[in-house]
Image (cartoon, rainbow, N blue to C red):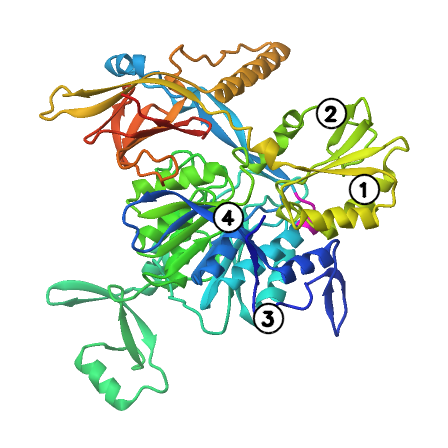
């Protein structure tokens, strides 16, 4: 359960914007479940305990990488009285798409050196890989807007009075969210709708319309006073040729300039001063103009159509293989424009970590938040490479989501004992369980991808009783209702006793008891030795990985091979299965040694670490090298713990035994 609920905002809006009818005197936006959203907003944001998982550097700026949902992260910030100066969010677009991460099998360290000696390089297109679902962007419009309303209200509650917010969307939902933000932030605080053209040409010809090739970035401030630094773009060659067409030689140096009108308010004193500086130019008609030298001109002020920043391509140095990754240049522009050094920049749907990384490079403090473990790991590694200092925190919301909500929902059918699909039940039910006494029992499971359903309160229980249970088959004797978080179990039980007039028994079950036992840790066989590496003067502690096994990765590869083989058979194409050596070292992505503490409850301290990229090359302590991994990791101090991340992102900690 939540520790407590934190108010969203001192002056919570009385009503939410409702999309239904528009009249001259009143604008009303109406959509399903709005009353439930308002109740949740009035109740407040759920505050859970926060656990520090790792510290990187001294972190004097209190930078944070938070695994958890936006609402809970904002509750924590508000409880700690932390104010954010700039927010950029790139939330799901309500596009109906699933996003997957390509998982690459690494080179076997046993043969990597032989490959290097023969100067054979594997083309990236030929690398063995499979896909793993990261998160789903599958919403109906009404639920999406309810969800966005709660999150935007939470974000507003932790923004400083001079803060601004950029919300990155596209054509699917941007126009609805624009109206929503007018209600939350006020129409007077709308600053712009920025058009970002993602690439020079989409390469797509629409069947009945032009190809879609831009995103919308809604820009709002919290108040009339906000930070904005004008950004200037370089002049184009054509502009320079046309406008800076005058040339003069000053102290032997050619200087190009354009002439500009002198303002009517220019005083005679100023004119005389400009003449003395040689800054006055006379046209053929004798008119007086001001010389504007190209060396001194700042450029063209930025407008709201951005065509000069392309999306991250497959060859980009900043590519981190994240489905929705945005270019650093885009965030650099936003952060420079709307914040100053040492200000706090936050991204509550952090994705690939571009906001935090760019903020750190520009001397800003940062908060990265995301519910997905892939996001946290990608961002953590990216920040280490950027030499950033930060803490990795995890919101203890009572459920250990198995990697991410999408994968958990996909696996729930196999996790809940006896749960089977049932065509006689509507979509309110996940399926049914059959036992000898009660027969077929319909099972309700909260949607882990929708935070609003995770708390079982009287309103949610009433909906199950009034809307879902009346349509059950006549022979139903009992239903099972799973929950993640519950408002008050005794209160819910009393509510069921008083309100359940269906004649069907309701059993409450805690879903955490299922999920907490899901994660199967990987296994590793290793040896520890105090050795003196060839060519080095000093001895080091060296851990050699003899073998590594991840059942989950092996099962994913098995599933991929079977599916690909079936497709190849149908299409009469050749297929090369992914195979793993007996040692299994190809399934390792990252290793770290902690020489500071062997306390399993202590935050992780990475004294040395190795990241193996998809080509098999090593990034050691944030520095890219051209060396293949040799199956070892070393440290000057004796290692007490070792953490290994497999290629799917699961991390397992091993206490080092000598």
Q: Which residues are magenta?
A: 139-143
Give the quarter of the image for residue 439: top right
Q: Residue at x 34, y 63 (%)?
A: 340
In the rendered image, residue 148, in percent from the top left (x then y), is placed at 61, 54
Q: Disc 3 and disc 2: Cα gap in Å?
A: 47 Å
Q: Earlier in the sequence, mark 4 or mark 1?
A: 4
From what the image shows, is residue 250 above or below residue 436? below
Mark 4 burial class by Cα count in 10 Å: few <14, some 14-19, many 20+: many
**Residue denoted by label 2:** 420
**Residue denoted by label 4:** 349
Q: Secondary structure at mark 3?
A: loop
Q: Secondary structure at mark 1?
A: helix
Residue closest to the eye, 292 or 491: 491
Residue closest to the eye, 310 or 463: 463
From what the image shows, is residue 264 above or below residue 3? below
Q: Disc 4 and disc 2: Cα gap in Å?
A: 34 Å
**Residue denoted by label 3:** 11
């Amino acid at each position: 359960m939540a520790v407590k609920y934190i108010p969203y905002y001192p002056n919570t809006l009385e009503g939410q914007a409702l999309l239904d009818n528009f009249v001259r005197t009143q604008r009303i936006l109406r959509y399903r479940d709005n009353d439930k959203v308002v109740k949740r907003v009035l109740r407040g944001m759920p505050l859970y305990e926060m656990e520090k998982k790792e510290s990187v550097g001294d972190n004097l700026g209190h930078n944070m990488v938070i695994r958890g949902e936006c609402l809970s992260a904002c509750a924590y910030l508000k409880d700690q009285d932390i104010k954010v100066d700039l927010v950029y969010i790139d939330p799901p677009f309500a596009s109906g798409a699933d996003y997957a991460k390509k998982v690459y099998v690494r080179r076997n360290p046993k043969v990597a050196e032989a490959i290097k000696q023969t100067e054979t390089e594997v083309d990236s297109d030929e690398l063995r890989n499979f896909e793993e679902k990261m998160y789903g962007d599958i919403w109906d419009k009404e639920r999406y807007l309810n969800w966005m309303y709660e999150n935007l209200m939470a974000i507003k509650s932790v923004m400083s009075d001079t803060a601004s917010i950029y919300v990155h969307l596209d054509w699917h939902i941007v126009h609805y969210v624009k109206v929503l933000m007018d209600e939350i932030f006020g129409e007077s605080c709308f600053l712009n709708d920025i058009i970002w053209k993602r690439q020079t040409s989409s390469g797509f010809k629409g069947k009945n319309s032009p190809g879609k090739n831009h995103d919308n970035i809604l820009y709002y401030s919290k108040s009339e006073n906000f930070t904005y630094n004008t950004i200037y773009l370089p002049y184009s060659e054509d502009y320079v040729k046309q406008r800076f067409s005058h040339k003069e030689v000053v102290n032997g140096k050619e200087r190009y300039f354009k002439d500009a009108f002198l303002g009517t308010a220019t005083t005679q004193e100023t004119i005389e001063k400009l003449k003395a500086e040689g800054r006055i130019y006379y046209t053929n008609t004798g008119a007086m103009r001001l010389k504007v030298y190209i060396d001194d001109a700042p450029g063209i002020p930025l407008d709201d159509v951005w065509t000069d920043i392309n999306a991250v391509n497959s060859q980009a140095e900043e590519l981190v293989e994240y489905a929705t990754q945005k270019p650093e240049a885009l965030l650099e522009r936003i952060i420079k424009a709307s914040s100053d050094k040492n200000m706090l920049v936050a991204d509550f749907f952090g994705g690939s970590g571009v906001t935090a990384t760019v903020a750190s490079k520009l001397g800003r403090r940062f908060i990265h938040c995301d519910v997905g473990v892939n996001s946290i790991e990608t961002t953590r590694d990216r920040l280490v490479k950027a030499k950033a200092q930060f803490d990795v925190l995890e919101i203890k919301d009572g459920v250990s989501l198995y990697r991410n909500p999408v994968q958990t929902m996909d696996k729930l059918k196999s996790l809940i004992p006896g749960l089977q699909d049932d065509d006689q039940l509507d979509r309110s039910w996940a399926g049914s369980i059959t036992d000898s006494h009660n027969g077929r029992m319909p099972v309700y499971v909260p949607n882990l991808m929708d935070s609003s359903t995770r708390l079982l309160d009287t309103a949610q229980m009433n909906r199950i009783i009034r809307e879902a249970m009346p349509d059950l088959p006549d022979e139903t004797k009992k239903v099972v209702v799973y929950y993640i978080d519950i408002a008050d179990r005794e209160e819910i039980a009393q509510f069921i006793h008083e309100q359940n007039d269906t004649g069907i028994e309701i059993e409450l079950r805690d879903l955490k008891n299922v999920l907490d036992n899901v994660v199967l840790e990987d296994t590793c066989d290793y040896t520890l030795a105090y050795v003196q590496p060839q060519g080095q003067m000093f001895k080091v502690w060296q851990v050699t990985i003899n073998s590594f096994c991840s059942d989950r990765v092996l099962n994913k590869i098995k599933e991929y091979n079977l599916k690909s083989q079936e497709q190849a058979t149908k299409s009469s194409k050749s297929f090369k299965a992914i195979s793993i050596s007996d040692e299994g070292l190809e399934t390792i992505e990252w290793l770290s040694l902690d020489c500071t503490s062997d306390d399993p409850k202590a935050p992780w301290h990475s004294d040395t670490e190795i990241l193996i990229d998809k080509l098999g090359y090593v990034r050691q302590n944030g520095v890219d090298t051209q060396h293949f991994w040799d199956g070892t990791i070393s440290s000057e101090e004796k290692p007490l713990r070792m953490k290994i991340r497999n290629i799917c992102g699961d991390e397992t900690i091993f206490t080092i035994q000598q």
